[in-house]
Image (tube, grey):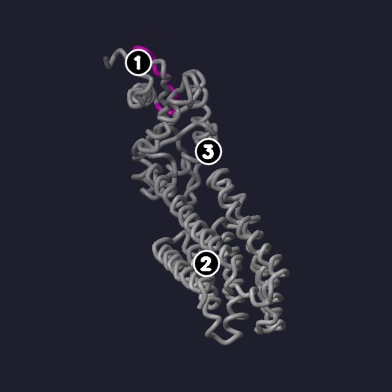
């Protein structure tokens, strides 16, 4: 057993460890379960292929040469499939199956002898390099959209190095002696290639696991800041977006929306209908919001809307558009058209002394909402300075 052969044996153990980690991830996730299983599959295929290569000296030729190459190529096919699954891309399964079958036939025709090592290397290098290119072409753009430019460049660099290594291996093989063609043969090129493969394997597997953890961490954060029923922000989410708005906008206004007679809707039609009304009101409100506006469920049937960059007059006009959108839309639920209206209180940040005090601004808008309720509901009332001084 050469030093290179021993190095590949240890690499196979490292890959098997990563395959186990992916399998464990699949057991404890639901949305990404198939992706984790496919990632475990390609890592396990690479591990099996590498261990078969490292044990060529004591295995039958068809196992150490032909089967090992096929298993490694199968791993690259699973790699492309996993990326397509991860980013919900249209599957190229038929193309990959054709590539796999065609390569397998070529390996069978070439045979498992040492004399045909160069031909097998060309088949494996070409097919695996093509899979690397497909993986980068399919995955880098959605990766950039999800994680940004730096991550996309880093993963693209790893992919380019891996692809270049296959191309270089085939190119160098044309000038190697027959006894140096084997991956486990004792040569400087094979030794340096081994070091590079170790580096690529660890960086790639670690990066893919890190990206999975990052995606799930973002999902958990999103769940913690969203109202489960309506999809609007909850209070924690409202406080987080509030801090960002303070940093980026000098002026802003707050609108409080309260659905009129919501308890009567629940008592008459049931709480499940009430839940649907809440969802539909949020949908109608989102239809009027600008991209930078933020909507949060503040409690029960009450919602808070933050309008960055808007003064109080603009906020009143916005609230009126939402009021009309809700009033003119007859909600059809259980074959019954339910008329829904809402009342609004509006306050601008100039009405409070501390511009960073969200809850003081909400309190002032809530005072205006109280007047809207007291004056017949289904209307927009703007907070005035006396509403602030009355509480002082």
Disc 2 to disc 1, C-alpha distance = 57 Å
Choose the circle earlier in sequence order: 3 or 1: 3
| Res 31 visible | yes
**Label 2 – label 3 distance at C-alpha:** 47 Å
For the point 29% across and 14% down, which residue is it? Answer: 390
Tag 1, which secondary structure? Answer: loop
Reply above or below: 19 against 307: below
Tell me, yes or no, whether the highlighted magenta stretch contains residue 25.
Answer: no
Q: Are marks 2 and 1 in contact (CB under 8 Å)?
A: no
Reading the image, the residue beneath label 1 is: 353
Label 2: which residue?
38
State how far apart marks 3 and 1 are (Cα). Answer: 38 Å
Q: Quadrant of residue 266?
A: top left
Which x, y percent locates residue 113? 66, 84
Element on which disc 3 rests: loop
Quarter assignment of residue 76: bottom right
Can you tell which mark lies on residue 329? 3
User: Reading the chain from its start, which is encountered first: label 2 or label 1?
Assistant: 2
- Residue reaching furthest to the left: 392
């Amino acid at each position: 057993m050469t030093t290179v052969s021993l190095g590949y044996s240890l690499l196979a153990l490292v890959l098997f460890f990563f395959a186990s980690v992916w399998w464990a991830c699949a057991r404890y996730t639901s949305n990404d379960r198939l992706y984790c299983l496919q990632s475990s599959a390609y890592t396990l295929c690479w591990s099996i292929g590498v261990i078969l290569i490292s044990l060529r000296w004591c295995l039958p030729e068809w196992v150490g040469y032909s089967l090992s190459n096929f298993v490694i190529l199968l791993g690259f096919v699973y790699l492309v499939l996993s990326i397509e699954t991860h980013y919900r891309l249209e599957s190229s399964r038929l193309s990959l199956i054709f590539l796999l079958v065609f390569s397998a036939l070529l390996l069978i025709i070439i045979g498992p002898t040492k004399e045909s090592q160069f031909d097998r290397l060309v088949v494996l290098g070409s097919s695996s390099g093509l899979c690397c290119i497909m993986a980068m072409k399919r995955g880098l753009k959605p990766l950039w959209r999800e994680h940004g430019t730096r991550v996309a460049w880093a993963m693209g660099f790893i992919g380019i190095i891996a692809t270049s290594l296959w191309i270089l291996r085939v190119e160098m093989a044309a000038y190697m002696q027959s006894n140096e063609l084997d991956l486990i043969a004792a040569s400087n090129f094979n030794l340096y290639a081994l070091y590079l493969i170790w580096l690529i394997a660890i960086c790639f597997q670690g990066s893919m696991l890190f990206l999975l953890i990052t995606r799930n961490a973002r999902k958990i954060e999103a769940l913690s800041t969203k109202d489960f029923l309506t999809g609007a922000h909850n209070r924690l989410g409202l406080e987080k977006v509030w801090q960002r708005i303070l940093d980026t906008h000098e002026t802003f206004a707050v609108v409080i929306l309260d659905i009129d007679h919501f308890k009567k809707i629940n008592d008459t039609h049931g709480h499940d209908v009430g839940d649907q009304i809440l969802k539909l009101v949020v949908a109608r409100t989102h239809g009027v919001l600008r991209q930078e506006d933020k909507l949060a469920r503040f409690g029960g049937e009450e919602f808070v809307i933050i309008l960055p960059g808007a003064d109080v007059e603009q906020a009143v006009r916005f609230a009126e558009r939402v009021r009309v959108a809700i009033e003119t839309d007859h909600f059809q639920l259980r074959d019954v058209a339910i008329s829904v209206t809402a009342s609004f209180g509006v306050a601008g940040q100039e009405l409070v002394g501390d511009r960073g005090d969200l809850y003081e601004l909400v309190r002032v808008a809530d005072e205006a909402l109280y007047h809207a309720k007291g004056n017949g509901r289904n209307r927009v009332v703007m907070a005035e300075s006396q509403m602030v001084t009355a509480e002082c």
